[in-house]
Image (spheres, rainbow, N blue to C red):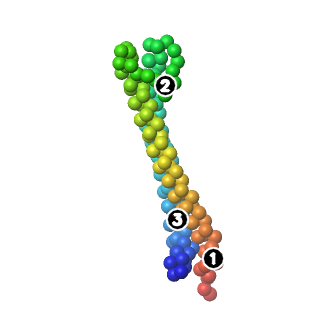
């Protein structure tokens, strides 16, 4: 019970809710920064993947989804076909990693923002002004 009382006292102290508020801004900045950096990395890879797929489509004279590419060694565009598959997989895994990281950052943002608000609202009730 002492831990719970101590945690409530610390969260509702001025330093406590100010600290959580600062942490919220740090986490939100990390969230936005990771979005921009991975997007600038993943989009060119995705564009290259489609460029190579178009080369294969031109050889086969038909449209093919990138998931349905079947690279055969006797194709003229075998190298482009393999590169299209590789770059598509690389782009997907980068975006999956971004999604997982941002889910974690979102959880921390809600937690720190919520604790900051709770601390701010309950501060006058827990720490009564002594006259």
Q: Residue at x 60, y 65 (%)?
A: 117
Residue bearing the label numbered 3: 20
Q: How far separated are the C-alphas under marks 3 and 2? A: 49 Å
Whether residues under marks 3 and 1 lie with C-beta atoms below 8 angstroms apart, the answer is no
Q: Which residue is mark 1?
A: 124
Whether residue 23 is visible here, answered yes or no, is: yes
Question: Where is the C terminus found, in terms of image quarters?
Answer: bottom right
> For residue 83, which quarter of the picture?
top left
> Is tag 3's residue or tag 2's residue first in the polypeptide sequence?
3
Percent position of residue 15, x then y? 51, 71
Q: Is residue 127 left or right of residue 47?
A: right
Could you classify mark 3 by the number of other residues whose Cα lies within 10 Å: few (under 14), some (14-19), or many (20 or more)?
Answer: many
- Residue 129: image quadrant is bottom right
Figure check: 21 above or below 56: below
Q: Does dot 2 land on a helix, a strand or a loop?
A: helix
Q: Position of residue 53 (x, y in %)?
A: 45, 22
Residue 31 drawn at (x, y percent): 50, 50
Label 1 crowd (10 A; few <14 / some 14-19 / many >=20): few
Vertical side of 97 occupied by 76: above or below: above
Please give the name of the residue rendered at 62% of the width and 82% of the height, measured from the top-left corner: 128
Of marks 3 and 1, which one's residue comes earlier in the chain?
Answer: 3
Q: Residue at x 44, y 18 (%)?
A: 56
Q: Position of residue 76 (x, y in %)?
A: 37, 14
Q: Which residue position holds label 2?
A: 68
CA–CA distance in space, label 1 to label 2: 63 Å
First in sequence: mark 1 vs mark 2: 2
């Amino acid at each position: 019970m002492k831990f719970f009382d101590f945690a409530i006292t610390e969260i509702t102290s001025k330093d406590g809710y100010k600290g959580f508020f600062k942490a919220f801004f740090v986490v939100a900045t990390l969230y936005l920064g990771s979005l921009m950096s991975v997007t600038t990395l993943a989009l060119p890879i995705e564009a290259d993947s489609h460029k190579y797929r178009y080369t294969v489509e031109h050889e086969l004279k038909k449209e093919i989804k990138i998931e349905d590419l079947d690279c055969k060694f006797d194709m003229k565009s075998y190298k482009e076909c393999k590169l299209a598959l590789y770059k598509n997989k690389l782009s997907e895994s980068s975006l999956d990693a971004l999604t997982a990281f941002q889910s974690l950052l979102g959880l921390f943002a809600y937690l720190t923002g919520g604790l900051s608000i709770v601390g701010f609202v309950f501060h006058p009730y827990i720490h009564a002004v002594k006259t």
